[in-house]
Amino acid sequence: MIVGRTVGKAHERNRVRRRIREALRMCVANPAGIIVVARTRARAADYWNLLNELEGLLAEPDTGLGRDRSD
């Protein structure tokens, strides 16, 4: 998970990181291998918004999840 300094100070980045980590646990049984890049708007989002956004992204058929990227 990548949360850059543009998101805010350390405590804000850590809060975003914790919220995204927990939302991933709710969406996926094994979130290992999933890369999430948090942008500035993630700071203002609450847990439920992040959860809904992640569920929507993971439900898209062309997210690349489960595909072999060696081609």
Image (cartoon, helix red, strand yellow):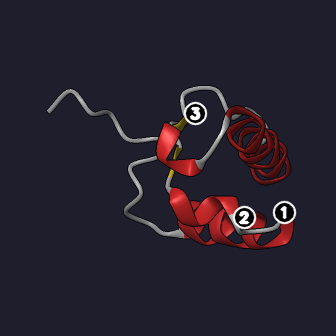
Q: Amino acid at mark 1?
A: Tyr
Q: Callout 2, which amino acid?
A: Leu
Q: Which residue is mark 3?
A: 1
Q: Is residue 44 above or below residue 36?
A: below
Q: Quadrant of the rendered structure where residue 51 is?
A: bottom right
Give the Cα separation between the discs numbered 1 and 3. Answer: 16 Å
Look at the numbered disc 1 and give the secondary structure of its residue. Answer: helix
Q: Quadrant of the N terminus?
A: top right
Extreme-left residue of the structure: 71
Query: Label 3 sits on what residue type?
Result: Met
* Residue visible at 73% across and 32% down in the picture: 30
Nearer to us in this view, 54 or 47: 47
Residues under numbered marks 3 and 2 in contact, where contact means CB atoms less than 8 Å apart: no
Q: Residues within 10 Å of mark 3 (few under 14, many from 20)?
A: few
Q: Residue at x 69, y 32 (%)?
A: 10
Q: Are marks 1 and 2 in contact (CB under 8 Å)?
A: yes
Is residue 47 among the parts visible in the rendering? yes
Question: Percent x, y for residue 27?
Answer: 77, 54
Q: Is residue 12 above or below residue 27?
A: above
Instruction: Report the residue that reaches farthest toward the front.
Output: 9
Q: Quadrant of residue 25?
A: top right
Residue 47's disc number: 1
Q: Is residue 70 left or right of residue 61?
A: left
Q: Of the residues under marks 1 and 3, which one precedes in the sequence?
A: 3
Q: Is residue 67 left or right of residue 17?
A: left
